[in-house]
Image (spheres, helix red, strand yellow):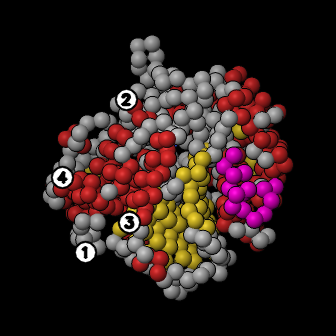
């Protein structure tokens, strides 16, 4: 805990020195309207329903998160965890609610290795051993009790209704069910997601009566209804039967943590983002610090891409080297957030030459799908929530605990199974992110607020190792005057240090930009990329609130 408090003091010190008051000067009292953007229309509506009942952004955040757990079960759920970045308008209090999964007490450093010390393929993703102890139910109760206005029971009602009465299957979720069909057929999930063993057609009503029951117990008894008593027993028995190692004590001891966000500054704008156990906020701020030495607004696009990639390469290298759960490891946070450190990193960037990742001090990248989920909210009083929740890969491990309707996450794959061996997102890491009982796996989830003199943006996205880079591109675009509804449509590019590849979405780079980047020595690869960004912006001058959902997904943004 000493490490944690030191870390807090350091983060606070940095915050104190870098926060530009100019970013706050023009903020009016309240927007008077609310905006919610989430990955599913029914989840956005659930949030709106709660706002109409007199709830604030925090009540709506719980309602949206719980609804997403039901209608987007491939991406997050009661069996997973998440980070919720909160801003309370009345006193400008900011915090991040960390309800990340933790490794069970019986977890061991080498649990994903065979006797020869090699990583066993699939063990950290497709088995019950892949599941960390869930944090999401505790996170819901924590946010509701500490920040909401309405009773916890009330805010869970839309989710309970959606689980009990069902919702129509869309193409996106159907695609995930096709991919997981065999796993589902072998277990309890078949009853929920398949129709007599077959993948149902679009429009089929997915009902989750067991999940509705679990949500009802949670609503009535609070988090204890999940972490203690009959639900806990069913969870532990179910996980054990499938070969897992959860115990009743693991569940009873689960704790939500509040963490001081990390703060940064970029050309007068204020950045508020996710601290460890996310690597996202620090990497985002370090990348912005590196990039603040260039005039990206006027530079040609190929050079701009080159510089963003060089910054990303360097911050992802540091992620691999230093990052882990702050309650277990000490990280050079102050150094990584310092403009002087960024200046040193900038000095090694050549304007016309890619830096091979191998030439950086060594330690050890992409595709995923669009698992995990994000939503953004600003309410009429100016309270904000950026929430990113996950069960890691599509439908987690695909294993469902019978009786409670809960899918197990495979978040244990976010740990380093063995130094240098890439995980499912091809991320490498060091001892800082090794497995230990009670430890939180390092995350890339980056819920973020960006404040400039004339407005604020609340944003985030799923996408595993791609997340920080997507938030970085959106931040730069918005600060360079591109409105949220345009920036979400733009083609994206990505670099994560290892593998040493600059990947880009079809259409993101012109032929001549590709030629220039190749000449600089970048290894280019065109590929589809995960991303389902949800943004809410509030323009102080016009008073306009916008809620924007990534066209790559099926989400919906609504202003009320
Ligand atoms: O916490 C993390 O970094 C990952 N578990 C997030 C996974 C994710 O975003 C999957 N989306 N494609």
Is residue 333 left or right of 121 when viewed as pictured? left
Q: Which residues are magenta?
A: 138-153
Vertical comparison of 117 with 155: above or below: above
Of the image marks 1 and 4, the number of the one nearer the N terminus: 1
Q: Is residue 165 visible?
A: yes
Q: Kindly identify which residue carries mark 2.
A: 419
Residue 153, how many percent across, how many down?
81, 55
Query: Badge 4 is on which residue?
Result: 348
Query: Camera-side residue: 141 or 155?
Result: 141
Q: Earlier in the sequence, mark 1 or mark 2?
A: 1
Marks 2/4: CA–CA distance: 26 Å
Residue 298, label in figure: 1
Q: Main secondary structure of the magenta part?
A: helix
Residue placed at 56% from the left, 62% from the top? Answer: 94
Identify the residue at horizontal 61%, vertical 67% (top origin): 88
Which residue, given by chain and number where applicable, does mark 3 sit on?
A: 18
Q: Position of residue 427 (x, y in %)?
A: 39, 39
């Amino acid at each position: 805990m000493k490490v944690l408090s030191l870390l807090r003091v350091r983060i606070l010190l940095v915050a104190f020195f870098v926060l530009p008051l100019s970013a706050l000067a023009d903020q009016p009292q309240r927007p008077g309207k609310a905006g919610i953007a989430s990955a599913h229309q029914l989840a956005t509506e659930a949030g709106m329903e709660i706002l109409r009942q007199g709830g604030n952004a925090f009540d709506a955040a719980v309602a949206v998160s719980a609804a997403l757990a039901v209608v987007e079960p491939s991406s997050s759920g009661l069996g997973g965890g998440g980070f919720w970045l909160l801003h309370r308008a009345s006193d400008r209090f900011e915090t991040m609610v960390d309800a990340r999964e933790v490794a069970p007490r019986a977890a061991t450093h080498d649990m994903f290795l065979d006797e020869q010390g090699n990583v066993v393929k699939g063990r950290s993703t497709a088995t019950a051993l892949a599941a960390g102890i869930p944090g999401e139910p505790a996170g819901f109760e924590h946010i509701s009790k500490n920040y909401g206005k309405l009773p916890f029971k009330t805010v869970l009602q839309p989710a309970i209704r959606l689980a009990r009465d069902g919702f129509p299957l869309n193409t996106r979720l159907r695609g995930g069910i096709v991919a997981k069909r065999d796993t589902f057929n072998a277990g309890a999930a078949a009853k929920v997601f398949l129709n007599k063993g077959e993948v149902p057609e679009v429009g089929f009503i997915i009902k989750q009566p067991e999940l509705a029951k679990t949500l009802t117990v949670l609503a009535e008894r609070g988090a204890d209804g999940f972490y203690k008593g009959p639900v806990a027993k069913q969870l532990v028995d179910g996980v054990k039967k499938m070969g897992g190692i959860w115990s009743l004590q693991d569940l009873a001891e689960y704790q939500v943590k509040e963490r001081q966000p990390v703060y940064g500054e970029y050309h007068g704008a204020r950045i508020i983002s996710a601290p460890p156990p996310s690597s996202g906020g620090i990497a985002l701020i370090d990348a912005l610090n590196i990039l603040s030495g260039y005039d990206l607004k006027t530079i040609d696009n190929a050079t701009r891409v080159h510089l963003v990639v060089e910054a990303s390469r360097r911050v992802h290298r540091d992620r691999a080297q230093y990052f882990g759960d702050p309650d277990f490891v000490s990280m050079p946070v102050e150094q990584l957030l310092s403009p002087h450190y960024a200046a040193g990193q900038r000095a090694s960037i050549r304007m016309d030459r890619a830096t091979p990742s191998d030439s950086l001090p060594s330690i050890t990248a992409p595709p995923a799908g669009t698992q995990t989920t994000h939503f953004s909210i600003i309410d009429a009083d100016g309270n904000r929530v950026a929430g990113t929740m996950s069960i890691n890969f599509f439908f987690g491990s695909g294993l469902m605990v019978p009786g409670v309707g809960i899918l197990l996450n495979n978040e244990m794959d976010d740990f380093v199974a063995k130094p240098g061996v890439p995980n499912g997102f091809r991320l490498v890491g060091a001892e800082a992110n090794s497995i230990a009982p009670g430890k939180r796996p390092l995350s890339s989830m980056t819920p973020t607020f960006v404040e400039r003199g004339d407005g604020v943006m609340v944003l985030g996205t799923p996408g595993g190792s791609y997340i920080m880079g997507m938030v970085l591109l959106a931040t730069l675009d918005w600060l360079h005057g591109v409105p949220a509804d345009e920036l979400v449509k733009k083609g994206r590019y990505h670099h994560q240090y290892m593998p040493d590849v600059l990947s880009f979405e079809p259409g993101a780079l012109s032929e001549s930009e590709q030629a220039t980047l190749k000449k600089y020595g970048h290894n280019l690869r065109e590929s589809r990329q995960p991303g389902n960004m949800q943004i809410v912006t509030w323009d102080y001058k016009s008073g306009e609130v916008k809620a924007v959902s990534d066209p790559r997904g099926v989400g919906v943004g609504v202003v009320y």
